[in-house]
């Protein structure tokens, strides 16, 4: 099976079988890393990093050099023509005419999709704002696979900054796809996992979500002692209780043990990440968030529940992971980083088509995507996420959404995957002159199901709806 | 013919025949781009970019990698020893002892000449302030050549920021050298082409300059509809009428059609560039200039005059070229960028001597340079251009000029090519003690022709002249 | 002899024999520079520059490319994960899992040692703050060796910023090790050589230090005419007289000629460096220091004393070395820079183990290090140098010192090599409960020799000592 000329923008761009094949190739390359030098000789990778990074950029560049390829790179947005006002699309087209493959990190969510749309060569998303960082997820899953042989049935706790930490979101999707048993979200105060992530998990991967009442937290209390425990206690009184998600694919779901047992992750993994300070907007908020951030240290690891738990971290760490833990055999984070090289070598070679993988027919399952109707118009509703590439490059990007729900009407931006629930709709039937009066409606009326998706017009605000049409007597009743 | 160990500082460093040969090699390399990997193996290119750039730098680095060579680069002036006060000359000598070829972009005009003077290896100017960017011109001409098979007889409109846009200046010289029929300058308000560029065109390439009165602009008015037309209208009332230049080499000049026909460039090209905001000194000036900047959009391209006109742009674009034009087959700008790679591959291989080109004897014509007398002294007149390298590195650079005219006396700086008309002169005959009184003269007296060029002393100001000598009774009469 | 998997953090990491072997390999590589392309093919060098540099970084990267290896680089601390709060140790472990060899420049003194401690691959110190820059010293000594055939018996004047100029400190040690006869320190005003450097020279290389009274400076006065002479005059009245150091290894020491002869360095070298402005803390101090900085120009070089003196400079220069000197055959500084490439090629190939060197048995002498006792504790005294890596990365670095003297008690930080003289001590015998009263003592009592080094506890301040134990009646007497 060839992946030639494909791009990796979100983790969903690869099927489970493709990922398993990629992992086999990574194993092979890892075992003979010095014999891969000719695999991509003469090929050029563009490494475009518009946000700080050492690890990811150097990992990709190392991977390309180990394959014998060359690298051109642009690492600082201020030193590039983007500072002259150039669009991402133009940059993508030009760099795509130079290089054979592009690796892009950018602060705007959905930027990698735009690059992939315009470049004409394979594109790898190395992190687009708070959206996704799919190769980090590949490395995380590869580490679990290496250490536990399978992801199926594992119990994983995701811990720390679950709000701004994109690696955690991607990993949650990846774990759900590979049938992990439990994913326990242990967030720092004020850093809970966004609802759109939880919604996507339940809707698309069939999981069930449980909110654990404070009174049931006794064993978690043992799990996160001292400072961490304090934090959790506060979180509960604020109603920000621990949440965990289980993929419903598993038939054993109803047979699941009680909560007290469920938080024993000694055969699973504890994954913590730093507070993504660069995404926190105010300094005072940052200080507050930091105060109650969970910490993994020697004392915590003495707990019976964590006897053989893998300790994972995407790095860089700040204070949430004590240096004294480094020598512990459960520590996986430097291995995670090291395995990034063979995983990325395999990915680059596959997308450039210099390597192929064979996948047993029965494993060649794609991720079960739902075929949502698409909404795309020049006017009306736009993505409200200020970090979305469609908001920042509105000059040439037309808003585009998937209609993921109609009760209430919910749109998911195809760029940043943020969801929004607009209040007003209309039908283009009228707009095109077939009806005399341009009527608009509240989105929570039966009209949302009556108007065909291809005729639907959706507005951000009532004033926008009014500017477009005449007020409807239907909607007035709802005010 | 070998170009080994030559440098490309200004476009004039290559003869027409050499350029044609380079284009043939670029064709060849373009046709077999993956077979060039061994051409420069083991050679090192230093890529020194002291001004923002993605396109040009990555294009050069791609070219070197495609040839199998290696690249060392310094991309941010703040991260280099220049921030410690090092001179360009020292940097050139040191980097010249590391690398086999140097590519330099620098904000100071003439900086590339200084690097070439000191490096001891071939140097390519990748843009020196507002002065020149000769490989951009090579790419522009190569694109015209590819699409129109010849440049001779083409009618080209240069549009937009003609004041700060160095690519436009270089291109104008290039078009003149290759016998384009008409070059039409359509400037944004306040962004007219500098007089020294026009002077050089007429003096050295034998062109005739026409100012088109506002009343004759009817077809241009059709050409640039809407916003662009407005701009032109304002420009005309300010006396900043459209200017176009024709090389006088062409015998057909006198047979030229009327203006209305002349502005039909449907078989030619329309070349627009962005406003070079980074060279505009005040923010308010920038805002004003931007307001009336010409724009190429779908509506404009519907005009009959532009039916098969090539739309060219050096990129990056800002707002002057609408995204809706990208899909139009007349759009050449992404091709221009892509062809930068084979053109630069050919250039690098030729300067490193790993490739040679054959030129038919009859084509090996150099650009017809005029042999102006040179003026070079430790004291007296200096280049007044604040961006000139000779002004900024006065520690070790002696001012040097070509005396391009004596009525009025006009000096052209050999570094930045800016021209100036100094007011006072004297003769070194007296200075060396042969005359008792040190007399100085106004530059617009007959003395400017009487004093031999090798004896001429030229002053910036009367006070400087007075400090040097005694006032002349000849010159007093002129005050 | 193989140097495989060794690091070069300080100049003392290589024995004299190893350095001689490295110089032979550099000779060999220099003679056939284009035949070294396969030596390191497939190997990756990480080039991590957290401080401005063109020369050193490009020199290392050139060296690796000439050997056929690949380079990954991070050049701006702001663009890396260190800006997210990552430790040097974590970065070292991660990059060490990517690359085969690491070159590091960092503003903190001792940072390269930390990288070498954690990376797991060979590490080369390319400058750690004001501490060391050992490959610069290798290039300096290689230049002397090339030009004078031997360093033994040379008389070298080190001139300029002797306070902040790390290259000068390293070079002084190198010259002492290779038995230079005299090292004359000619400092700019306020820029005298730090006492810890002089102490290390005398203690470890057996030199004798002479202070030359102002009245004996007549021939130095001839040596440094004009401005430079002025500076020296002022220096003397301030009691900052010229200092020179002679290694006592030489048996001829007592037969040394008078001072007047000694300052004739016509067969030696004059080594000047720029003012390290980036290490000067206040702007006014910088201006003051600059005013009286020594300058080497044509006039100075006309002096008989300097007839065939080599003029050396680590570059970049600012104003201390006139451009008019460049054409002088005594100028060595561009050669110094050029020879950096083969020297670094040899070093990289040796540390990667792709080349070996043979050393005659009699030359395989290590530098005669003194086996000082080591002091290492979690509490008590810490390095007081604000630029020391152990101060800045205290999260995980335990303070560690060599006890280099006990009268007065003097500790040398193993990271930055700064020395300090703490005032209070105690014994861990008592701390571990064997004595009822926790007593501390003044460091200048006999207790400093009575307490075994392994039991010694050393405090920064009396308040710290008091916090730890009870006041001692022994120490009170000394207050």
Image (cartoon, coloured by chain):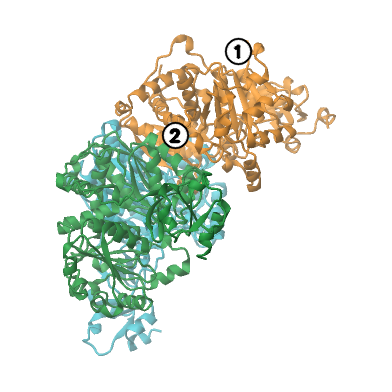
Chain colours: A orange, B cyan, C green
Name which quarter of the figure residue C335 lies in. Answer: bottom left
Task: Choose top left, top right, bottom left or bottom right for residue A219.
Answer: top right
* Rendered location of residue B8, percent (x, y): 28, 51
Pointer 1 local density, CA inside 10 Å: few below 14, some 14–19, many at least 20: some
Q: Which residue is mark 2?
A: A103
Q: First in sequence, mark 1 or 2: give its number.
A: 2
* Residue under label 1: A250
Quadrant (top left, top right, bottom left, bottom right) of the C terminus of chain A: top right
Q: Secondary structure at mark 2?
A: strand
Foreground pick, C463 / C299: C463
Up/down of B287 relative to A8, above or below: below
Comparing A100 with C357, the one in front is C357
Q: Nearer the viewer, mark 1 or mark 2?
A: 1
How much space separates mark 1 and mark 2, taking CA atoms? 36 Å
Left or right of B447, for residue A98: right
SS type, badge 1? loop
């Amino acid at each position: 099976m060839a992946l030639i000329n494909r791009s990796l923008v979100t983790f969903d761009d690869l099927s489970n079988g493709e990922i398993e094949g990629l992992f086999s190739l990574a194993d092979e390359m890892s075992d003979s890393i010095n014999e891969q030098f000719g695999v991509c000789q003469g090929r050029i990778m563009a490494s475009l990093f518009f946000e700080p990074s050492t690890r990811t950029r150097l990992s990709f560049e190392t991977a390309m050099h180990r394959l014998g390829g060359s690298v051109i790179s642009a690492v600082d947005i201020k030193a590039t023509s983007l500072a002259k006002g150039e669009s991402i699309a133009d940059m993508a087209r030009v760099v795509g005419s130079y290089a054979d493959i592009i690796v892009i990190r950018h602060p705007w969510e959905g930027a990698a999709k735009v690059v992939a749309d315009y470049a004409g060569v394979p594109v790898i998303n190395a992190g687009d704002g708070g959206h996704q960082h799919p190769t980090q997820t590949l490395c995380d899953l590869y580490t679990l696979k290496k250490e536990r042989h399978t992801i199926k049935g594992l119990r994983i706790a995701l811990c720390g900054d679950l709000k701004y930490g994109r690696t955690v979101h991607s990993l949650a999707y990846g774990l759900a796809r590979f049938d992990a048993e439990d994913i326990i979200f242990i967030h720092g105060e004020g850093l809970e996992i966004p609802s759109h992530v939880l919604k996507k998990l339940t809707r698309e991967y069939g999981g069930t979500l449980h909110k654990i009442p404070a009174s049931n937290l006794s064993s978690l209390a043992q799990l996160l002692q001292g400072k961490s425990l304090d934090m959790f206690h506060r979180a509960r009184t604020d109603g920000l209780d621990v949440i965990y998600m289980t993929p419903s694919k598993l038939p054993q779901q109803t047979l699941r043990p009680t909560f007290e047992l469920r938080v024993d992750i000694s055969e699973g993994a504890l994954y913590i990440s730093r507070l993504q300070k660069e995404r926190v907007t105010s300094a005072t908020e940052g200080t507050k968030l930091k105060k109650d951030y969970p910490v993994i240290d020697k004392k915590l690891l003495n707990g019976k529940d964590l006897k053989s738990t893998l300790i994972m971290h995407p790095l860089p760490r700040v204070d949430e992971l004590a240096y004294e833990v480094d020598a512990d055999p459960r520590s996986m984070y430097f291995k995670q980083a090291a395995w990034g090289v063979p995983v990325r070598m395999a990915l680059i070679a596959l997308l450039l088509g210099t390597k192929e993988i064979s996948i047993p027919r029965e494993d060649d399952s794609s991720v079960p995507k739902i075929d949502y109707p698409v909404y795309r118009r020049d006017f009306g509703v736009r993505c409200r996420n200020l970090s979305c590439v469609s908001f920042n490059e509105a000059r040439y990007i037309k808003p585009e959404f998937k209609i993921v729900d109609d009760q209430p009407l919910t749109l998911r931006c195809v760029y940043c995957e943020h969801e929004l629930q607009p209040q007003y709709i209309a039908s283009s039937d009228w707009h095109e002159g077939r009806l005399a009066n341009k009527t608009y409606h509240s989105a929570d009326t039966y009209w949302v199901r009556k108007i065909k998706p291809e005729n639907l017009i959706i507005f951000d605000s009532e004033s926008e709806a009014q500017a477009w049409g005449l007020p409807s007597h239907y909607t007035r009743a709802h005010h």
